[in-house]
Amino acid sequence: MIDFNKTLICVSAFLLFLVVGCSSMREHTCCPEADIPDAAIRIAIEDFSNHCSLFRKDSTFHVRFNDKVHHKSTLYSSPDEHGRPIWRNAEGEVIEGLVSVGIAGFGGPYFYGESTKDRLPSRYIIVNDKLFYWEDAACPMTEETFNVFMKYGLLETDEDAWWANLSVGCDDKKVAHYYFKNNDLSKFKRVLSTLAMGEYEPPKLR
């Protein structure tokens, strides 16, 4: 059953974003209907490009939507076959009613080849000549998108590539995390952190 209230909120947020940001933005999309992931990503990019200091740090940004937000993970140990402790992280409980979007500076190229082309990002928005890109299984990469990604140095062609991306993250590099109420995307908070989502306690949203 369609949740008309949720759909109305998402579409309203999406239209507001277009009014605010369309003058400096170019985008590629094959999914015209706004939904929660699409609307949350667009709102996060609009806030990031206008209000976040990290926007000045890079020219290419990876965007990721998460449909679940967890409480902080806990560290525990369990013995291996020799009785030596192995430390692991236990994922925290899901926080109901929240979704999130992460925006991080580009960490390295993706390898485009026959084995990897269906596992690569396929969506993008350009704001003030800066590229924001993300994965969307429902939208295959087009020739236009391929050319844009090549222009920004996002792709390297390698027909023998098996891994789509071999970049190594920088542990001390800050990223932006956006937390949204999934029934009202106008309510969100931005957190800048060197930690991954789930490694700290998310902010509370009223």
Image: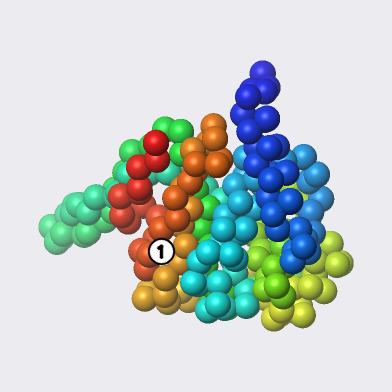
The residue singled out by tag 1 in the image is 192
Tell me where residue 3 appears, x and y as whole percent.
Answer: 64, 23
The secondary element bearing badge 1 is classed as: strand
Residue at the extreme top of the image, as rendered? 1
Q: Residue at x 43, y 44 (%)?
A: 69
Q: In the displayed structure, would residue 45 be above or below residue 97?
A: below
Disc 1 marks a residue whose amino acid type is: Leu
Q: In the displayed structure, would residue 32 be above or below residue 120?
A: above
Q: Residue at x 80, y 44 (%)?
A: 32
Position of 1 compared to 56: left or right?
right
Which quarter of the figure is the N terminus placed in? Answer: top right
Depth check, front residue: 159 or 144: 144
Position of 71 compared to 187: left or right?
left
Q: Residue at x 62, y 58 (%)?
A: 46
Depth check, front residue: 176 or 149: 176
**Residue 94 lies in quadrant:** top left
Tell me where residue 70 appears, x and y as whole percent.
Answer: 38, 44
Q: In the displayed structure, would residue 6 be above or below residue 52?
A: above
Tell me where residue 145 appears, x and y as whole percent.
Answer: 80, 66
Tell me where residue 93 appears, x and y as whole percent.
Answer: 33, 38
